[in-house]
Amino acid sequence: MWRLAGRAVPEKISEEQLKTFMECPSNSFVCLWSSTMDKAYNWRAAQSMIFGQPLVFDMSYEKEMSVREVANTVRQLVLSESCNRRSVDPFHIHFCNFKEDSLYQREFIKHYGEAWGRLLITVTDQCYTEIFPKDKLIYLTADSPKVMKTFDHDKIYIVGSMVDKSIKTGLSLARAKRLGLETAALPLEKYLLWSTGAKNLTLDQMMHILLTLKDTADWKKALEFVPRRKYRGFSLFGRNKANFLTVLKKTKLTYFCVRLIPECLCFQAM
């Protein structure tokens, strides 16, 4: 089952009109009809289905969750789709391993209604390994021993469509290993002074992070979408650890604490 670009694609908006619209100053948006904005968003989403970098959501975890958890997962996916559609350079979203008449589907229909059939995304019951070359796939999981260093525009990232709190540790990693796929975890500990607690992120937070990385390649900007309650600040080590240690040796300072709030460092002299 494939859900491709179709009825929702605007037919009467030209490239010139779209460019003019995108160049409008922010205070001019109040003068534009919401329908025009929707056309622009849909136009970009339609283009992403042809030219955009694929982003896969693995929809194979329904049996691992309760009804409430599936509903929560779908809410996060709806937010992810909305965020992606409104971005400057959207991903081409793929819902893979998606089953007809599944709880996932029923929850999506509750949210979208008739618009579910017009979403500019690809929905398929096929596995991503049947659609894309394996050497192009990277499964993003917090359990991976490999830490993601940079965003690769030539790779296809996979995100498990589940509520992490309900899933036992290592499930997505085990699935990726069974399929012989490369895995990666976000470098949360490298860039953030993490507080206590699990490093769980919602699907819409992941979408914000990946979109920001794709557009800017800036981890600091991307990880600003991690909830502030989960960490104490940004670590300078993530920026330039070697230079930082050199400065410490030259100035004979003992490291006391490193906090970026947003740009303040605290040290204690020997």
Image (cartoon, rainbow, N blue to C red):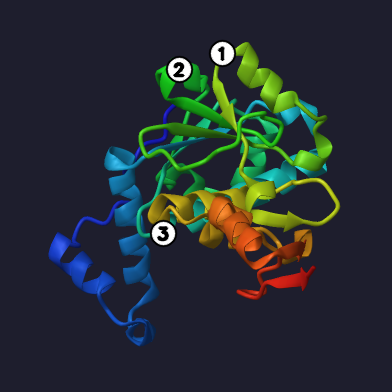
The quarter of the displayed image where residue 195 is located: bottom right
Q: Check the picture and name the quadrant holding the C terminus.
A: bottom right
Instruction: Please tell me whether mark 3 sits on a helix, a strand or a loop.
Output: loop
Instruction: Return the residue nearer the eye: 236 or 131.
Output: 236
Left or right for 23, reference 186: left
Vertical arrangement, residue 218 with respect to residue 116, above or below = below
Label 1 – label 2 distance at C-alpha: 8 Å
Residue drawn at x 70%, y 34% as measured from the top left: 103
The quarter of the displayed image where residue 193 is located: bottom right
- State which tag comes first along the sequence, 2 or 3: 3
Residue denoted by label 3: 87
Instruction: Please tell me whether mark 2 sits on a helix, a strand or a loop.
Output: helix
Residue drawn at x 64%, y 59% as measured from the top left: 249
Residue denoted by label 2: 134
Q: Position of residue 159 (x, y in %)?
A: 59, 36
- State which tag comes first along the sequence, 3 or 1: 3
Residue drawn at x 45%, y 42% as measured from the top left: 151
| Three-letter code for the amino acid on which mark 3 is drawn | Ser
Left or right for 248, reference 213: right
Left or right for 255, reference 49: right
Tell me the number on the disc at residue 151: none
